[in-house]
């Protein structure tokens, strides 16, 4: 039987409003020990901001992280999955769009989680090196 996204996703995604500064978003990522946050506009998914986005689209372009909003550099209109979609469908989307993470939304647009490349690797090949790295506790 095919497993469903809600069985492998990480619930309670970390979000920031679209007018949050990059500096504040970076602190949120640091404090939550994550590499991305979901960008919302009045609770609705607007985009994804990664630590790489901050470096490549802001710092490398001499943008001030204190004055630049996440809206200015995030990836807008992200590809999403539903909680009852099959894991195979999530894998196909990640491959097709060369993604590392997919927000999980209900049919009415409620943001309930994120499924990552690491989550799917652990699910599909728990003995792989990537699965071991993904499952390991982060260095602090």
Image (cartoon, helix red, strand yellow):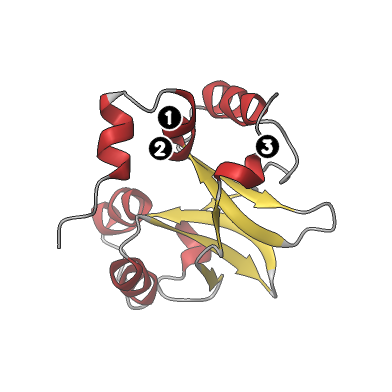
Decide if residue 33 is on the left or right side of residue 73: left
Residue 63: image location, x then y, percent: 31, 64
C-alpha gap between disc 1 and disc 3:
14 Å
Report whether residue 58 is seen: yes
Ranked by sequence position, the earlier of labels 1 and 3 is 3
- Identified at 74% across, 62% down, the residue is 110
Decide if residue 134 is on the left or right side of residue 115: left
* Residue density around tag 2, few if under 14, some if 14–19, many if 20 or more, within 10 Å: some
Residue 106: image location, x then y, percent: 77, 54
Circles 3 and 2: CB distance less than 8 Å?
A: no
- Identified at 62% across, 67% down, the residue is 40
What kind of element bears circle 2? Answer: helix
Residue labelled with disc 2 = 118
- Identified at 41% across, 75% down, the residue is 21
Badge count: 3
Is 16 rendered above or below residue 55? below
Report whether residue 79 is seen: no
Residue labelled with disc 1 = 121
Outermost residue to the front: 1
What kind of element bears circle 1? Answer: helix
Residue labelled with disc 3 = 4
Quadrant into which the C terminus falls: bottom left
């Amino acid at each position: 039987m095919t497993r469903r996204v809600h069985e492998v996703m990480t619930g309670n995604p970390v979000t920031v409003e679209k007018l949050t500064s990059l500096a504040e978003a970076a602190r949120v990522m640091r404090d939550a020990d994550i590499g991305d946050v979901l960008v919302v506009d009045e609770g609705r998914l607007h985009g994804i901001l990664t630590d790489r986005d901050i470096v490549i689209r802001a710092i490398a372009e001499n943008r001030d992280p204190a004055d630049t909003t996440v809206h200015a550099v995030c990836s807008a209109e992200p590809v999403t999955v539903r909680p009852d979609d099959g894991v195979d469908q999530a894998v196909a989307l990640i491959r097709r769009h060369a993604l590392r993470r997919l927000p999980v939304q209900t049919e009415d647009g409620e943001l309930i989680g994120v499924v990552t490349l690491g989550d799917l690797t652990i699910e599909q090949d728990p003995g792989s090196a990537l699965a071991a790295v993904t499952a390991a506790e982060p260095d602090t």
